[in-house]
Amino acid sequence: MSIFDRANLAVSRRQLLIGASLTGAGLVIGFKPHAVAAASEPFAPNAFIRIPQEGKITFVMPSVEMGQGIYTAVAMMLAEELEVGLDQVTLEHAPADPKQYANPLLGDQITGGSLAIRGIYEQMRKAGATARIMLIAAAAREWGVSPDACKAEAGHVVETGGSRRAAYGSLITAAASEVVPQDVPLKPASSYRVIGKPAHRLDSPEKVNGTAKFGIDARPDGVSYAAIAICPHFNGKLRAVDEAPAMAVKGVTQVVRIEEAVAVVADNTGAARKGLAALSIDWDPGPSASVSQSELERQMDAAIDGKALPHVNEGDVARAEAEHGPVHEFVYRMPILTHSAMEPMNCTVHVRPDGCEVWVGTQIMSRARQAAADVTGLPLEKVVVHNHLLGGGFGRRLDVDGIILSTKIAKQVSGPVKVTWSREEDIRHDCYRYLNYSKVTATLGPDGLPVSWRHRVIGPSVMARWLPAFTKDGVDLDQMGGAESPYAIPNRQTDFARHEAPDGMLTGNWRGVGATRNVPPVECGIDELAELAGIDPLDYRRRLLQHKPRLLGALELAAEKAGWSSPLEKGKGRGIAVAEDFGSFAAMIAEVSIGADGRFKTDRIVCAVDCGQVINPDTVEAQIQSGVVYGLSAALYGRITVENGAVVEGNFDDAPVLRINETPPIEVHIVPSAEAPGGIGEVGTPGVAPALLNAIFMATGKRLRTLPIDQTDLRRV
Amino acid sequence: MAKRTLALTLGIALAVAGLVAAFEPIRGHAETSGGGALKGAADFASIADAKARSKAIFAEASRVLTHPRCINCHPATRSPTQGEDMHPHVPLMIAADSSMGPAGLACSTCHGAENRAIVGSRLKSIPGNAHWQLAPESMAWQGLSVGEICQQVKDTERNGNRSHADLIKHMGEDHLVGWAWHPGEGRSAPPGSQAEFAALIAAWVETGAECPD
Amino acid sequence: MERGAALGADGRMPYNLTVNGKSYAVDVDGDIPLLWVLRDTIGLTGTKFGCGIAMCGACTVHVDGLPVRSCILSVSEAAEKPVTTIEAIGDTPEGRKIQQAWLDIDVVQCGYCQSGQIMSATALLAANAKPSDDDIDAVMAGNICRCGTYPRIRAAIKLAAQG
């Protein structure tokens, strides 16, 4: 138990609330922190840093690790100010407690929106610095010297001019009685010794030797294993099932029926899956049974010219159109997407009369806990959520539907039960990125540059359900993010034609959120306008980005590294896309070639990113590569279809994802910057599809406006 | 500049639906579902000209040879295809160095000595045979006409130095050839049976092993 | 002998497995995939479930020294054969080299697929001491990673091949 919890609490909400008000642009604006109330409340122990008398210092991780490298980054921030080496610390998942661990920018214990580092950069460093100052004060008092005559290094307080030296662990009792400094100074970036230098990931060793524990690896004492079949039809229900065929399978102990699903419980998941497959389940397909893909697409097409709610309105678009016609119009269509995280959905729950324990990997701890409380009817404090490493998040684990289902099942099971989704259940019951269409309308001035830009966004409002605070007057601010484009266009209008998925089809957040839906139409649209104007697409963007030095800087660096102006062989093309979101600025250039068979190949992707102060440059490179691969996979393969009110695809055979042999070299170049750190987990994704589409245009003269890219034969398109 | 309104067709529907549709026919096929009957040699007795009869018999036998169960592993490149629609094998298999696949991702990584059942998936089984491997490069049939396949089959330079008698024995007794009629749940079988197929090959040999044009 | 499960009603354990050099007697149906016996019955959770149809490679183990997808390999097929999982692959020279390269390059992100990636990469290196990019792609195409660690997987295998 540590004394530094006091320090941490002092680090403090009050100051951090001020920090928290630094809700900058983009996504951040709407995610208003509501932590104000928490400011006056006492702080529970064990926040952020725990220094024992002996052994390693524990850092408690307020954000969850799903591959983005946040554990290492948080440790680096804490270690920077605490003056310890990364080899002197161990990491621990934070419990569900938003009062302690809410991301200041989100006001809740959420890891998403590329907000982790942006939310806690100051908070973590202050936690480290406050602890360090109190330890120094304690040592100085014991030695009878001024704190100024002491310094901290590698987990020790050292007397600057003398020989005395004390390990942090030996000082904790004394330090506990020191006054908690209220506003500690932080190091200038110029004296960082940890932040900004490449560091090895702290979670690599356990992920390399098989000991890392993901949610699916939880094995509480007495656990049983369940396989689940959820009604395949949206909003459908279980009508009846004869449990006998499953019960006849060796190892099966129970068949659980809930309103919308059947679960078979066994002494191992294999037996549970075998038992489940043996069942003939009678589903009531419900009211959505006739929903088909062609109908959904027809409805989206109809919504293009339907009612819409205004959002951005600058200048006078109607007048500009009248004066500068003709009006150019492009419609872009994007498909339904799954997340397909490698770790299928799973959740282990133990419901007892007096409490409930949940073992899971979730991006949204507080809602996970609340969900279990709601299903069991237990008070929140009786629910314990043990968070785990996430085998991929990508937004999928920002929803708690799996925790709700698993808890419903666990209520009928004695002892803890681990419910594991098959890949098919995972893909057919996702929180989908729904169909998103865009209509872009523009006019050009005599110089060929755009004078007007209308962008109608057609799609669902995820925020209306997921985070209503991020809507305004019925407009989903995430859906509209960046729709107005970053370009200097004097007259701009955007509007939102809300069109929801069929009832019962859950829609949710998908890596890159609003940017992945608006960057493709914006970046393809601007490319189309450049072509109409007869201006090189790089030069066109340059002329329109003079007011955006950071985005322009990334664009120039990417262009230089990609050799934009160098000649290309016949059948090859290059395409550009820029993306400004999550506090970061990225530019991407894709190079493609078209084979004799009409199939195209991505030869190379060059990305430049300005993400402000870099915490771990090695992670920035990895995350941009990661975002690019995720975006490539969606651009080439991402498409879910619906028939009979159910998702058709089910596994990697019919819902393929990118593999290593299709992955081009991906170059990442970082623009040096001392600006506040931006998010890095998502900014690599949105530009991939438009960069590819623009490159295909350069190679073939054909404009594809529908995703995924038709790969079969570009000669045919 | 002309007004340019570019409404779009359902391009993606074509793009991936091709793949999706390709999987549809697999659904629900039991092991026994096959390509129906194979004609016997007697069915060609009415063709008086022996040469013409031989060609016709081979053409009938080619219904087996060109069936996906057989020709998926006689690809034009060293990468097998799979499924009823003969799409590229997933994951991509490259057998350039060995008919058993590259060391590290050999056929045996997934394919066992027997078909392996799968539960809870559209794929009902993973096919398997003790000798599971790609046909030699010289036996690439995909993209060839039936006549070209026939020429390959009897060319000892390209058929593994098999005599006509060897061919009859191979078609009739080889365990991997025979797998085609026991392809595992979720896969169609070629027409007839291995014995009927071998009888046709024998009749083709007897009639002079003529190849269709 | 360790017991992965209680004795059957007849007091007999139907399948004897040898995993990472240790013997286990397991009382499950013969068609249960090895994956679930490893993870649930024996408790070796390093081997991961990803697709259940041998399409993603997350469940890769070595049987008789060769890589196999344990999600489709029945326990009856695996019985009486030496099985090596991620937990013990570091005891082989190639496994050790691959794991070290993975650490040196920091390949992992979420890490979920990496047990399978390492098992496949180890098998590749054992068969091909100096794999080219094409060799790497040909083998590693069987393993899906949704975090996009592919570029670093290529780099790490090459690094391991140098060491």
Image (spheres, coloured by chain):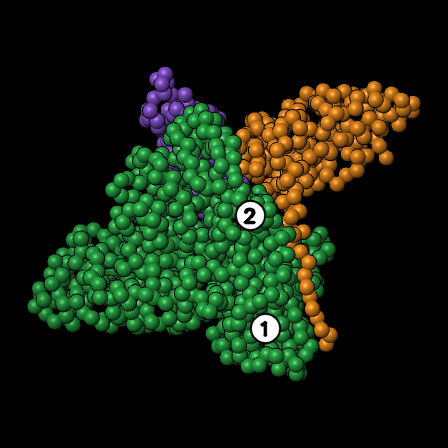
| Residue A278 spot, x, y in % from top left | 50, 29
Indicate the amino acid at tag 1.
Arg
- Please indicate whether residue A527 sits to the left or right of residue A262 in the image: right
Badge 1: few (under 14), some or many (20 or more) residues near its Cα, within 10 Å?
A: many
- Along the viewing direction, whichever of A278 and B136 lies nearer the viewer: A278
- Along the viewing direction, whichever of B28 and A243 lies nearer the viewer: A243
Chain bearing tag 1 is A
Indicate the chain coloured green by its letter.
A
Which label lies toward us, 2 or 1?
Answer: 2
User: Where, by quadrant of the figure, is residue A350 drawn?
Assistant: top left
The residue pinned by badge 1 equals: A454
The residue located at (41%, 59%) in the rendering is A112
Q: Quadrant of the C terminus of chain A?
A: bottom right
- Along the viewing direction, whichever of A1 and B92 lies nearer the viewer: A1
The residue located at (63%, 74%) in the rendering is A442
- Along the viewing direction, whichever of B35 and A550 lies nearer the viewer: B35
| Residue A46 spot, x, y in % from top left | 22, 55
Q: Is residue C91 visible?
A: no
Chain bearing tag 2 is A
Query: Chain C shown in which color?
Result: purple
The residue located at (20%, 61%) in the rendering is A42
Residue A288 circle label: 2
Badge 2: few (under 14), some or many (20 or more) residues near its Cα, within 10 Å?
A: some
Q: Is residue B11 visible?
A: yes
- Please indicate whether residue B75 sits to the left or right of residue A562 in the image: right
| Residue B187 spot, x, y in % from top left | 63, 32
For marks 2 and 1 on the same chain, the one whose residue lies earlier in the sequence: 2
The residue located at (35%, 72%) in the rendering is A22
Indicate the chain coloured orange by its letter.
B
